Each structure stands twice: as structure tokens, then as C-alpha cells.
Amino acid sequence: MPMLANPSDKYEGYVPLSMPDRRWPGRVTKAAPTWLSTDLRDGNQALVKPMTIEQKSLLFKNLVRCGFKEIEIAFPSASETEFAFTRKLIEENEIPDDVWIQVMTPARSEYIKKTFDATRGAKHVIIQLYTNTAALFREVILGYTKEEILRLTVEHTHVVRSLAKEYSSTYGTSFRLCYGVEGFSQSDLDFVIEVCTQLKSAWEADGRSEYPVIFNLPSTVECAPANHFADQVEYFCRNMPNREEITVCVHAHNDRGTAVSATELALLAGADRVDGCLFGNGERTGNVDIVTLALNLYSQGISPGLDFSDLKGLMDVARQCTDIPIHPRQPYAGELVFTAFSGTHQDGIRKGFRAMAERHAKLAGTGKPKIWAVPYLPVDPADFGLSYKAVRVNSQSGKGGIAHLVEQALNLDLPRPIQIAFYKTVQDICDAEARELTVDEIALIFRRTYHFCHDGTDTDSSDPVQLRAFNVTEGDLFEGTLSINDESRSVSVDVEDVRSTIISAVNQAGVYSFRVERQEFQVLPGGMIATYVWLRDDTKEGESGWWGIGTARDATGSMVRSVISAFNCALDNYKRSNEPSKTNNHL
Ligand SMILES: CC(=O)SCCNC(=O)CCNC(=O)[C@H](O)C(C)(C)COP(=O)(O)OP(=O)(O)OC[C@H]1O[C@@H](n2cnc3c(N)ncnc32)[C@H](O)[C@@H]1OP(=O)(O)O
Ligand SMILES: CC(C)C(=O)C(=O)O
């Protein structure tokens, strides 16, 4: 058995911080943090095929378009591509004046020099220097004690400081330092604070500065719950001397699947800046997903300061650059996120849209905000260039969703009994075929089931009862040609009598005794009239009846079509079964 009966023989749990007066649980986020996109660095370093210069350029442009003002563009000492991309952005003037580029370097002098060299001539540069403070990493990877890590970090901060001075005087570049505290969430926090304090002095950043030093606190590997990360961030913020002189950033990985929560709680705990990737790309399970974080804020009524109005376009770019698909259930963006298959959800969404439209109509002219509230649809997909058009129907669907599709395809707002009747028809087909039905298929099934001819096209030529051509004169005379079982006859009657005339004609043509038991009109968007009739045949004792549906520009035409639709449903069934055994309806 690969899994252990007692996993504590192999894995140690995290040690909670003792901080009974923790403050973050009582706080509420009211504003967006500063965002840093690391798509082109952490995102890139985790790809099977790191991005080409063209892919990096495309992604960079799109990050700028979304409104990122801080973008980690490269690890210039890693490869020629990384270096050349940095040069290209600078030499080809592709970096807007209000955007800071960030570049990453390990604590090695030759790499730091190369990193500075790559940034020659840029206006605003953040240098991210990283060292590892966690015992497991510093001992295993570097073989260093705490003192050695402290020395390594401070010494290399001096190197960064002196190069920053030189490049800033030669090229006029404004530099900020970001210290990536690799392993932060697995480190002794008092040691982290000691390193950060000394680094801040080495950067000569004691006192308030226009460009405060950034401390980037990662869960390099996420191995504790989100509340623990928040405790760690609060501890750092409360114990770091002169907290107001620094920027605190978080960089959460998603090993436990909780990077979004960890980041949200870390913001409550005092972080000012978030470092992450679009759609959660990044090492292993990825970095925190900035799209989700930003849209979580948006859905709480807080402007995220990032524009994701074209999520589909952005997904295409992300896929093109990373060659990683986006999961259909990816929050906000996934292909199935604004789709409901199940009946109760479809019903709830449909009712929700109507109720909201009514509520909003009442607010017209009051200046009050039209708040979004639709069951199962926490946000309006239209805000992100997406839509809820895609109600999709399978055997889990109910009458509400099917009615929504009929409305979408044919404009009809079906009365409840027809919704119920048609749902059974559709469900039988879905079950038998074990697949999803498209809007077009639903529309076709509807036309066939109800012999429904939409929008002026008269009945199907194979239908037993057909209305060939008709008009209603100014004197309210109905004139038309009725064909019953291929026998044509002219009808010319007062509109008041048209229904009874047609019913008598059909009754005489067979041994029927049809009568309309119920009739309902509806004005459709665009001015068409829909009529729904419920037809009974009194010769068929014990049988239910037949729904008929018709539309026309005038009420008489629509009513006549609905009666003919019901006749065809009945007669077609009589013909096929020879016995009047089934109806198309259930009242
Ligand atoms: C958590 C993070 O995401 S950190 C960023 C990680 N990103 C990357 O690694 C992508 C780019 N990296 C690279 O291109 C290369 O790893 C380079 C250029 C940085 C270094 O390459 P190499 O010198 O060939 O070393 P290699 O990759 O094999 O191993 C890393 C070395 O850096 C050392 N190292 C690790 N972290 C640091 C650090 N923060 N500062 C200084 N040295 C470090 C390791 O101890 C190891 O040194 P060793 O060769 O003396 O044992
Ligand atoms: C060094 C930091 C920023 C990092 O990428 C990590 O620890 O995951």
C-alpha cells in the first residue's frame, strides 16, 4: 500500500505561530494591492519550453494593456533569450513611462552585474535579489548557516547598491530593490526580520523613501494552511522595525491549492503588494492566479486596478505564450464557468435574470446602483467580454434551461405547461442519445414537436392541415386557403368566426370533435404575437389534449396558426399510432 496508515511517520505538520492577538481575522479588504506580474519570470521558468522573445513581447504588451504597472520581465543572467528580451524592450522603447520592469538575480556578483547590464537605459527598474532563509534550503542547497546567509545577502546588497548608483548616474535610471526572501514561509521569522533589517541598511534605505525597499515574502513551497501564512505575514509586518518605510509583497505558490486564500488573508495581515501570474501559471502547481484575485475584489465592488474586460483574448494570449491549456473550471475564465447544465441551476439563473430586470426597471431614473444578483451567477460575464448565452442542455437539465434556449432561438416565452411537456420530449432524446443538445437542435425538436412554423413561413408541406396563404382585410375579414389532407378549401369569414370555422372544417374532414379549451396570447419582443392553444378531441375519451403554438404579426393570424399547429400534433400522432394513444402535452 503506497499510502501510509500513519502519515505522521513520514510528514511533519506545520508549527502554528502563537499570536493570540492576531488582527487580520477582524479586517476587511477595502482596496486593491499593487500588482506585480511574474508571468515572464516565475511563469516562464516553469514552462516545458520557455517563451521565445516574440512570445514574451506579446505577453508583455498584453500585461501592459491589462494595466500592470510592475512587471517582472526576466532573469537576465539565465540565458541569452532573457538578456536579449530585456534589451529589446528597452532599446525598442516598449516600456511605458509609468511601468516598472523587475528583473531577478541570485546573490552572485557576476550575475548581478549581468543583470544590471541588461537594464542599461531603462527608466524604472526593480532589482529582485533573492536568497534562501529556510533551514532546509539553506543547509541542503547552499550548505550555509544562518550567519553565512546573512553575510551573503548583505554583501550582495552592497553590490546591488553600488551598481544601482553607477547605473542611475550613467543612465538616469530609478532603481528599487526587492528582496525575495526565498523560503519565507518555512523560515524562522526572527531570522528573516534580522536579514531584512540588515539588508535595508545596506541598501541605505533607513528613513522614508520615494521608492521603498520591497520585501517579497513567498510561500516558496506552500506547506501550511492559508491562515498560517497570514499569521506569518502579520508577524513580519508587526515586528519589522519601521514598517511604514517598506513595501511588503507576497508571492504565494499553490502546492496545497490555497494560494488565492493565502494571498487574500495575507493582504488582511498587512501585505501591500501581490506577485503572481495570469491564470496561476508558475512553478509546480503555479503561482497565485492574479486574475482570480483581481476579480474576487471586483465581485465585492472593489476596483482591482486591472482591466480584464477581454478575458477570452487574454486566455488566447496566455495559451499561445505558455502552451498550457486553461482548465474549463478555472475561476471566472474557464469555458464552463458561465454555463449551467443542471435543471435547478438553469431555472434559478433564468428566474434571476427576470427578477433582476424587473428590479432594475424600477430603479430607472433614481440614480441608485443596479446591483447584480442572479442565483448561481455571482458576476456578470459580460463585464469580462463573456456571456451566459451558453445554457447547455443534457439529461441533467430541466424545463427552465430548455425554455431559456427556446426563448433564445425562437423568442417564445413558453407557458409553464408547455415547458413541462417539451422538457419531457427533450429529456427523452438526451437520455437516449447520452449527449448534450445544442440550441439549434433544441429549436429543431421544438418545431417538429409542435409543427411550429415561425415568422410567417406557413406549415410544413407534409403536415395534414395547412394554411396556405391568408390575410385579414381592413373590414376584419379573414381570407385564406386551408388544406386538410391535401384537399384545399377557401375560407372567407369574419375574424370573430375564423376559429370555429376552421375547427368545424377539420372536424368534418375526419371523425373528430376538436375544441379549444384554453388560449393564451403573448406579445413578443419586436411586436410579434404568439398564441398558445390547448386543443381537446371529445371523440377521444380519457385522452388529454394537444398544445398548439403559432406566431404572426397580428393576433388572428397567430391564433389560427396555433390551432393548426395543435391539429397537426394530434393528427400526426393519430396517423403514426393509428390509435390516439399519446399526446404532446401534459397539463
Ligand atoms: C524560488 C525561485 O523561483 S528562485 C529563481 C529560480 N529561477 C531559476 O533558477 C531560473 C534561472 N536559473 C538559471 O539560469 C541558473 O540556475 C543560474 C544561472 C541562476 C545558475 O546556474 P548554475 O551556476 O549553472 O547553477 P545551478 O542552476 O546548477 O545551481 C544553482 C546554484 O546557485 C546556488 N544558489 C541557489 N540560490 C542562490 C541564491 N539565491 N544566491 C546565490 N546562489 C544561489 C546553488 O547553491 C547552486 O550553486 P552550486 O552550483 O555552487 O551548488
Ligand atoms: C524568490 C521568490 C520571489 C520566489 O520566486 C519563490 O520563493 O518562490
Image: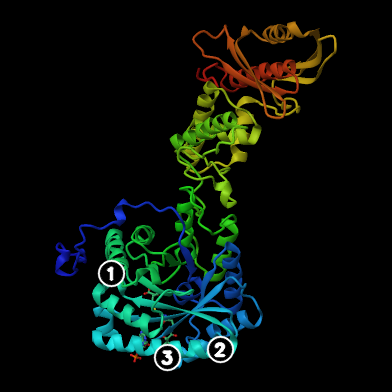
Q: State the separation of the CA atoms marked 2 and 3.
A: 16 Å
| Res 159 label | 3
Three-letter amino acid code at disc 2? Ser
Q: Can residue 204 be seen in this snapshot?
A: yes
Where's ligand 1: which quadrant?
Answer: bottom left
Q: Earlier in the sequence, mark 2 or mark 3?
A: 3
In the image, 468 versus 561, the foreground residue is: 561
> Could you tell me if residue 188 is visible in this image?
no
C-alpha span from label 3 to label 1:
27 Å
Relative to 395, does residue 218 appear above or below in the rendering?
below
Rendered view: 234 above or below 424: below
Q: Is residue 470 left or right of 560 when viewed as pictured? A: right
Q: Which of the image's four quarters has the N terminus? A: bottom left
Distance of label 2 from label 1 (alpha carbons):
35 Å
Q: Classify residue 454 by image quadrant.
A: top right
* Quarter of image, res 467: top right
- The answer to whether mark 3 is within 8 Å of ligand 1 is no
Residue identifier under label 2: 169
In the rendered image of this protein, does residue 542 appear above or below residue 571?
Answer: above
Q: Who is closer to the viewer here, 70 or 416?
A: 70
Q: Is residue 413 above or below residue 14?
A: above
Name the residue type under label 1: Asn
Q: Where is residue 555 drawn, in percent x and y?
A: 72, 17
Secondary structure under the numbered disc 1 in the rendered image? helix
| Whole-percent x, y for residue 7 in the image | 17, 65
Is 275 in front, or is 400?
Answer: 275
Mark in front: 2 vs 3: 2
**Residue depicted at x 52% and y 14%:** 544
Q: Which mark is residue 239?
A: 1
Image position of 243 (left or right of 551): left
Q: Secondary structure at mark 3?
A: helix
